[in-house]
Image (tube, grey):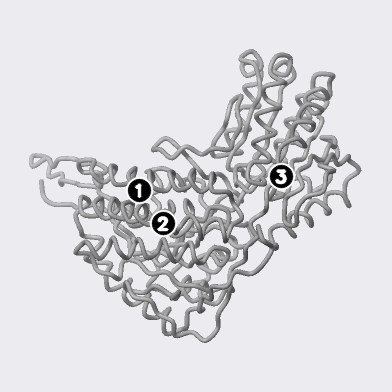
Amino acid sequence: MFGNQIAGKISCEGKRIFYSFNPSLNQQNTSAFPIATNEEVEHALAISKNSFYSFSSSKPSDRSKLLELIAEELALNKSIIAKAYCKESGLLLSRFEIEFKRTYEQLFLFSNFLKTPNFELLSETLGDQKNTLPHLVKKHVSIGPIVVFGASNFPLAYSTIGGDTVSALAAGCPVIVKAHPFHPETSFLVGEAINNAISKTNFSRGIFSQLFDNQYSVAHKLVLDNRIKGVGFTGSYIGGKALFDLANSRTIPIPVFAEMGSVNPVFVFPNSLQEKSEEWSSLFSKSITNDAGQFCTKPGLFFIPRSENGKRFVSMLSEKLIQEPSFTMLHPSIHFNFEKKKQEILDQSKGELIEKKESTVILEGRQGLFVTSASEFLEIESLEKEVFGPFAVICYYETINQLKECTEKISGQLTATILATQEELIENQSFLFLINHLAGRIIFNNVPTGVRVCKSMHHGGPFPATTDSRYTAVGSDSILRFMRPIVYQDNY
């Protein structure tokens, strides 16, 4: 039986239901999921608030153990989760293994982080009796119950027990997950693993709930409720900005940490292509097409010098890109938007579309490149828009000054990639300064896909890539989103 997960129990009060979709078979799945009622939402909010004090004041070592127990439960239920994952996403079992490993190891990353001595302590300044200066202790404290929205393209690593949930639980914040409607069964099974883990601890069952809805009603109720103190979101710009605006409309606004996508520009310098075209064309053809290009760090915009080497690189890239296998996209709506946004570019630009010609299965993403000029990029807004799928825009530039002009037009990004020789980097320091203000992660001579989960990673960037570029959605530093500093002062 599937239903809303509240306080470790399954609730099925709602009369309205929805079904997930199997993109590989191009048909609706049979399992029904009841949409959470107002009463169920209220219950989840109440127990989340009631469990906050005890959870936030718990020992970090106890929260560390909880995360390890969740990992154990996921491992025990891995095979059944894998079946639901592939059925609901159209992603291959090999991709599941990669994402499961990342999700599993992420739990231990935070578990080990919580074992760091005095991890909550920021700084301490001793008092001075002679000068009547106080003793100050600056620490982190958890901010309160958090709402997490699952992502469509990562049913595990950015969903029910993804980075947002793990970091919030590690911080001592109860979590209410609003499950993504594209993979509700996967979310439900992961939610049960979390509940099983909580049952083996002394924590209140109220520290985790998961609610289902295929529209926006539940999301609105959760974000507008004053018991919620923060939001974690990974998804589209439209969705993230709507939640951000909603949270700021409250009498008491709350932070929304939304990761909203990126075109992840690639800036190619002339001399770098002389020896690396073969290697880079192979790397980037896979980076664009891997899992139908459904990654927030997929390189989607290239600036190539208009030269013989530049044209040769584009020719090699397009040839290898078309030879890559095509993959089923996550959902009919995602496939529809992929084709729609490509068509918008075709309608507005005079460039050339290079696309796979062979017939593809329904809902497979037909990979392609759109080749145009930097001057046209400066004039046409759609060329800067993210196309979620196996597609990239190629812009030929004439001079470094024109390249700088294009860079200044680009809005905030998760990543920016530079392909250049050491000499070119040294000669173009002013350009590097521009890039520092463009993105949250800069990649030199490699691809942006493949986000390493560790303390040194920063997965964020200036708006509209994220709503707050100071914070990361990946790595142990992501816990800082759900904590705030507080100072305890006493005499001497």
The amino acid marked with disc number 3 is Ser
Query: Residue beneath label 2, please?
Result: 161
**Quarter-wise, where is residue 325 in the image?**
top right
Residue at 73 percent across and 14 percent down: it is 274
Question: Which one is in front in this view, the residue at disc 2 or the one at disc 3?
Answer: 3
Dot 2 falls on a residue whose secondary structure is loop
Residue 7: give its label: none
Between 487 and 244, the one nearer to me in the picture: 244
The tag earlier along the polypeptide, 2 or 3, is 2
Q: Residue 277: where, in percent of width, then height? A: 72, 21
Amino acid type, residue under disc 1 in the picture: Leu
The answer to which of 336 and 309 lies nearer the viewer is: 336
Q: Residue furthest left?
A: 129
Circle 2/circle 1 CB separation < 8 Å: yes
Q: Residue at x 57, y 61 (%)?
A: 88
Q: Which mark is residue 326?
A: 3
- Dot 2 or dot 1, earlier in sequence: 1
Viewer-nearest residue: 435 or 100: 100
Q: Nearer the viewer, residue 178 or 76?
A: 76
Which one is in front in this view, the residue at disc 3 or the one at disc 1?
3
Determine which residue is flagged by label 1: 107
Of labels 3 and 1, earlier in sequence is 1
| Circle 1 SS class | helix
Task: Give the image location of residue 1, x and y in percent.
Answer: 43, 76
Q: Residues within 10 Å of mark 1 (few under 14, many from 20)?
A: many
